[in-house]
Image (tube, helix red, strand yellow):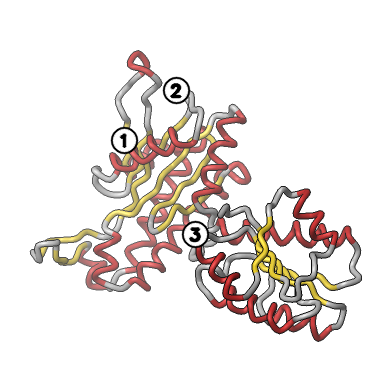
């Protein structure tokens, strides 16, 4: 079943309101009718539908039950649910209490129905495409942003930021402390990128401790240098005073052997289209991952810019830039 499908649940068998049917048709969203709340859940669990429409005009109890079941499950809870009701205020309130994302009462204009449904899908996409812990755009919007820059023919840089020794930090402290570090890094990236690039900067969260930010080529040095500088200033205070003063702590490797673990650093791999021609986001992603992996082999918080060009004739060595050198260049 396609994710773009709409599940239609009408316990009394009544057809959809004509305006809703027309909206689905104009948006090219195919529909599938289901006969019970069990079937609603079964279909939604197999593959998330684009939305679910429950008709609560004649048999509100069954439709409200189906809506509650969808919203209480962590997998299906993000699926937008529309309830059609009669005009009474009690039915309207009950529909929202059940968790409905939109409630269409009898008597509202066709134009308002269309506007409400379009706005609901926009809200759903926004909520689905952002990372839940940082509220930054996720992988879908990252790919869309990179493609937009490619198509605009502007000079841009894609920067892949990743934490070093993050797993060891989680093992020593807790996942709660680790999540706090992730939020701190997201805040640093957002504030620095927006501060240096304004609306020309974009920050996304791939997941875990992996982030992408897209900026104009001209802002690479200032932005990346500021990120590593602020990060190195703030991150030691996430450790205990003893670990912070020592600059390391002892942790166990996979064999159970003790070894020194330094404080966390950030590694940033940078890819630009100054000397390359990109045609799709996958090319950029592959190179950014390569540069991030290279940066992680270097000591401390660093950013590494890919200076190579397309083809053997244009290839030049990768130029790493450390925190110290970044400060000298500013």
Relative vertical location of residue 189 with respect to residue 74 in this rendering, above or below: above
Relative vertical location of residue 298 with respect to residue 217 in this rendering, above or below: below
Tell me the quarter of the image containing the C terminus.
top left
| Residue at image point 52% right, 74% down | 73
Residue 126 percent across, percent down from the top left = 62, 57
Marks 2 and 1, how far apart in space?
Answer: 17 Å
Q: Residues within 10 Å of mark 1 (few under 14, many from 20)?
A: some
Residue 193's mark?
Answer: none
| Residue at image point 83% right, 64% down | 17
Mark 2 vs mark 1: which is more N-terminal?
2
Q: Say left or right for 67 vs 247.
A: right
Marks 3 and 1, how far apart in space?
Answer: 25 Å
Residue 207 percent across, percent down from the top left = 42, 56
Residue 166 percent across, percent down from the top left = 30, 60
Front-most of residues 306 and 188: 306
Please tell me in which quadrant of the rendered image residue 260 appears.
bottom left
Residue 276 percent across, percent down from the top left = 45, 24
What residue is shown with label 1? Answer: 320
Extreme residue in the bottom direction: 90
What residue is shown with label 2? Answer: 275
Front-most of residues 211 and 41: 41
Mark 3 vs mark 1: which is more N-terminal?
3
Relative vertical location of residue 184 with respect to residue 206 in this rendering, above or below: below
Q: Secondary structure at mark 3?
A: helix
Residues marked 2 and 1 touching at CB (< 8 Å): no
Marks 2 and 3, how far apart in space?
Answer: 31 Å
Q: Secondary structure at mark 2?
A: loop
What residue is shown with label 3? Answer: 187
Please tell me in which quadrant of the rendered image residue 232 appears.
bottom left
């Amino acid at each position: 079943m396609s994710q773009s499908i709409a599940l239609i649940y009408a316990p009394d068998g009544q057809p959809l309101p004509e305006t809703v049917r027309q909206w689905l048709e104009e948006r090219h969203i195919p529909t599938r009718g289901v006969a019970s709340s069990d079937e609603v859940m079964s279909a939604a669990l197999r593959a998330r539908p684009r939305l679910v429409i429950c008709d609560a005009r004649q048999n509100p109890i069954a439709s409200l039950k189906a809506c509650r079941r969808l919203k209480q499950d962590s997998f299906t809870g993000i699926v937008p649910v529309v309830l059609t009701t009669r005009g009474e205020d009690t039915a309207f309130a009950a529909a929202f209490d059940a968790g409905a994302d939109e409630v269409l009462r009898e008597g509202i204009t066709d134009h308002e129905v269309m506007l409400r449904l379009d706005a609901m899908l926009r809200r759903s996409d926004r909520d689905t495409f952002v990372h839940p812990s940082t509220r930054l755009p996720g992988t879908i919007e990252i790919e869309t942003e990179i493609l937009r820059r490619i198509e605009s023919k502007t000079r841009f840089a894609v920067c892949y930021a990743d934490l070093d020794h993050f797993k060891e930090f989680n093992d020593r402290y807790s996942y709660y402390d680790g999540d706090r570090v992730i939020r701190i890094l997201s805040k640093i990236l957002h504030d620095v990128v927006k501060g240096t690039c304004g609306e020309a900067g974009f920050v996304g969260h791939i997941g875990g401790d992996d982030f992408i930010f897209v900026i104009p080529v001209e802002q690479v040095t200032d932005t990346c240098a500021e990120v590593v500088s602020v990060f190195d200033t703030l991150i030691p205070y996430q450790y205990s005073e003893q670990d912070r003063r020592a600059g390391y702590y002892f942790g166990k490797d996979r064999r159970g052997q003790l070894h020194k673990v330094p404080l966390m650093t950030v590694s940033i791999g940078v890819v630009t289209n100054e000397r390359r021609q990109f045609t799709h986001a996958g090319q950029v992603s592959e190179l950014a991952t390569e540069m991030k992996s290279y940066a992680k082999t270097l000591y401390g918080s660093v950013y590494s810019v890919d200076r190579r060009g397309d083809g053997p004739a244009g290839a030049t060595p990768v130029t790493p830039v450390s925190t110290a050198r970044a400060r000298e260049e500013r």
